[in-house]
Structures are given as structure tokens and as C-alpha cells.
Image (cartoon, grey):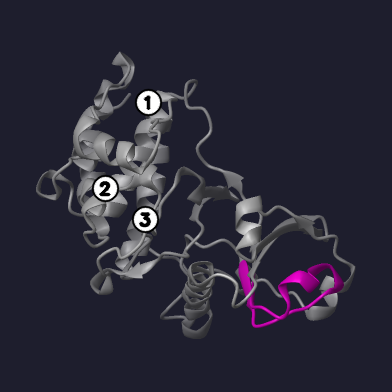
Amino acid sequence: MIQSKKPQNLLQFKEEDFSSLNLILKTKPKSLTFGRFLYTFEHQQQHYWLKTQALRINQSYEAGFLNELAFYQQFVDQRSSSNPMPDFLLPFQVIAHLKTDRQAESGRSPILILSHAEALFSDCSDMSLNEIKKTLLKVLDVLDQLHQLGWIHADLKREHFVQYQQRVCLIDFEQVEKVNLSQKMQSLTATPRYMAPELFHAAKKTIQTDIYAVGIIFYEWLTGQRLTAENYQDWAYLHCQRLRIVLPEHLLIFKKLLSGMLAKQKEGRFTDIYTVKQCLLTENVQ
């Protein structure tokens, strides 16, 4: 169930707060050339991220950023006792425009501020099977909430699942799409490492493509190994033909789960998160 969150989950920064902040640029060099700016900063002994996009620099980056802002803003506009803030969101704030001396490069662009959160998927080699199962269920619960609200994430990666105050949250909603309004991929708006086989044939993103992406995340986490490919064609060959699920003996109890999430044909893949969770819950994990 999506629980109501207190108002402090909406951050309340004022423009004057930014005049003395030490904004530390963390953007990757490639993203910088496309007008993306990602900063980290500290305020009242709490750590935050500030994300913005220079306008009229790169259409794709700008569209993704504005899509993410709209996704967050809907929950501010619609929040009420009958329509509470989703539990999977980090504390956040959307600011229509802000300009500081340290941010002159980005001009008066919209800004997204998020509380800092820790990575969720650390080494699981010392975890019990029951601890692993609980983590998998928390991830599935979060994704189920998103889907129940009528959205698919459409670009799930391992780093998009984070942990904040003992709850699992999702981040990076630049490619988020309405479940019933998804269109065929006209350009590469997903990460090949996590792309379901049908996406390499320009099919629409669906709940099942989200499930496939999470299946890859789970598989890499459980095995402690990253899938490898040299280029887009190699990734297509891996996902469409070559991928085989090979687990250590003590983790074979999760093979049925992964097989249902990573089926190459959509017809053989789990259709929704409820079905995924039922498979996991019926496994006798000690």
C-alpha cells in the first residue's frame, strides 16, 4: 500500500539559501557537453543533489529532464489525503528557475533537488538467503507502486534503486512513460545492458520490459558479475540469443524467478510484478 508521507518529504529550500552553498559539480564530462549539470551540496549537516539542464543545448537531454520534472511535479500538484505522496520517492523539490553565481553556466533553468541516498545493491555474498529475498521483495514492492500508479520507469539500472532511512526508493525518471501511452522506440532511450530483447526490435516499452531490466539487475547482483558486451550489436546478441542463467549452487533457488523475469519471448515472461512476487514468495528460502 502507498502510505501518506509527512510534508517534510517535500523539501522547502528558498532562493536565499543558495547564496552561500558550496555546490560541487559531479556531472560526467559527456553530459556536461550536452548542458547537464549535477551538483552535490551540504545544508544544515544534510547532503543533497541538485540537478538542472541548460536549455536549447541538446533536445534529448532537455526533453528527458523536463519529463522528470513533470513526473515529480504531478505529486506536488495532486497531493491530498486521498492522493498521498508515493512511498518510493526521495524527499525532493522542484524549483521553476534559480540562478546563483556558482550556477551561471546553466542560466535560469528549472532545478530538481533530491536528498542524498545510499546505494541499495552492495555485495550480497555475506547475506543469508532470507536477507536476499527480503531485499528482492522490497525492490519489487517499489516497482509495483510505480506500475500501480500507471507508469513504467523505462530505463531501470542498478544505481536507480537507492536506500533512504530504511526504505527503498527509485530515482532518475527521465524516460518514465505512462503504461498505456508508450510508443515504439524511435531512438535509444534505454541502456543496452538492461534492454529486453524486444526493445532491440524497436518494440514499445512495457511493464514486461521493466521486469526484464530488474531481472538483469537481480542476476548481476546475485552472481557478483557484470554482463559484458563490446557494442550495441553485441548487447542485442546477448539478450536475444546468448544469455543463459548460471547461478552458484547455493542460489539456485532463485533460478525459477530469474527465468520468468528474463524470458526472451514476452509470452514466457512474467506479466506483472504481482506474479514476480508470488514466484519469489513461494520459494522455500531459509
Name the spot of residue 147 as percent of width and height, x first: 31, 63
Q: Nearer the viewer, residue 240 or 13?
A: 240
Callout 2 environment at 10 Å: few (<14), some (14 to 19), or many (20+)?
many
Where's the N terminus, which quadrant? bottom left
Which residue has dot 2 on it?
A: 196
Name the spot of residue 268 as percent of width and height, x first: 11, 44
Callout 3 environment at 10 Å: few (<14), some (14 to 19), or many (20+)?
many
**Mark 1 is on which residue type?**
Leu
Which residue has dot 3 on it?
A: 143
The answer to which quarter of the image holds residue 231 is: top left
Does the rendering let one see residue 78?
Answer: yes
Callout 1 environment at 10 Å: few (<14), some (14 to 19), or many (20+)?
some
The residue positioned 51% from the left and 63% from the top of the image is 89
The residue positioned 47% from the left and 21% from the top of the image is 125
Question: Closer to the N terminus: mark 3 or mark 2?
Answer: 3
Name the spot of residue 141 as percent of width and height, x first: 36, 52
Task: Label 3, secondary structure: give it.
Answer: helix
Task: Label 1, secondary structure: give it.
Answer: helix
Question: Closer to the N terminus: mark 1 or mark 2?
Answer: 1
Relative to 3, residue 160 above or below:
above
Question: Closer to the N terminus: mark 3 or mark 1?
Answer: 1
Task: Label 2, secondary structure: give it.
Answer: loop
Q: Nearer the viewer, mark 3 or mark 2?
A: 2
**Mark 2 is on which residue type?**
Ala
Name the spot of residue 254 as percent of width and height, x first: 27, 29
In the rendered view, does 137 fall on the left or right side of 25?
left
Where's the C terminus, which quadrant? top left
**Mark 3 is on which residue type?**
Leu
* Magenta-tinted stretch: 92-112
Disc number for residue 129:
1
